[in-house]
Amino acid sequence: MLLSAEILRVHPDEPQPDRIDYIVSCLRKGDVVALPTDTFYGLAVDPVNLQAVERIYQIKTRQKQKPLSLLIASINQAYTLARDTDARLDKLAERFWPGPLTIIVRAGTKLPLRSTANTGNVALRVPDAAIPRAVVERFGLPVTATSANLQGAIECTHAGAVRDQIGDRIPLIIDGGPTARALPTTIVDLSLGADRWVIVREGAISTHEIALTLDR
């Protein structure tokens, strides 16, 4: 029997606390929840629930060696999830968070190795969107942020597109209206060691902006 996703409307700027509580209760029992971010809709699960993480790979038919990025609520939360960080993380976070920048760093011991796709790295960002930040704050943990679409299919900028692509594969879609951007996040990798960094994907923030920030 196919799932038919529940669609829950949540105010994009002032998320209703009771609805955030409901979303968190679903995450705690291992459900996959589609959430709006400031770029695309993403699939959120508890990253330390390995069955839930595995479910995301199944839903997206995603290669298992590709790690999932995580949404966090603040730079302070990044410090609890990462290790061997330096001033580059501070510079980028101060300039671009909240916003469409994903930063890859070495993962700390709080995350299971499987949640990093056995890479030992973790990709973090603070989204410029009230709903996912409220969920993370209430949950007390980061949530996964991989885009809510099938592997190779177009990313979703509204809840209806998520429903059409994967509404038969997940139990809950949060309708926070259309996302603010139609460009992906820029991904910068800081895990390579001191003074080394690379742009994995150029998206809403240009490589030039990243370089200017890191060279300050």
Image: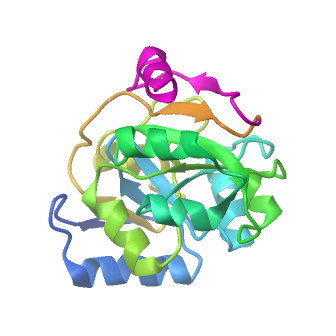
**x and y percent of residue 59 in the render?**
62, 52
User: Residues in magenta?
Assistant: 193-216
Q: Residue furthest top?
A: 208
Does 63 sit left or right of 126 as displayed?
A: right
The quarter of the rendered structure image containing the C terminus is: top left
State whether residue 3 appears in this view. Answer: no
Q: Position of residue 177 (x, y in %)?
A: 20, 50
Identify the residue at horizontal 59%, vertical 29% (top origin).
152
In this view of the protein, which residue sits in the foreground, 184 or 178? 184
Residue at the outermost front position? 216
- The residue located at (72%, 71%) in the rendering is 51
Report the label total: 0
Residue appearing at x 46%, y 40% in the figure? 91
| Residue nearest the viewer, comparing 105 with 142 | 105
Looking at the rendering, which quadrant does residue 74 occupy? bottom left
Give percent across and percent down for residue 199. 60, 23
Q: Is residue 134 left or right of residue 189?
A: left
Residue 198 painted magenta: yes
In the rendered image, residue 184 lying in the magenta stretch gets the answer: no
Q: How is the image coloured?
A: rainbow
Q: Nearer the viewer, residue 145 or 74?
A: 74
From the viewer's perspective, tell me whether residue 177 is left or right of residue 192.
left
Residue 192 visible within the image: yes
Residue at the image point whose x is 56% and y is 44% from the top = 87
89, above or below 194, in the image: below
In the rendered image, which quarter contains the N terminus? Answer: bottom right
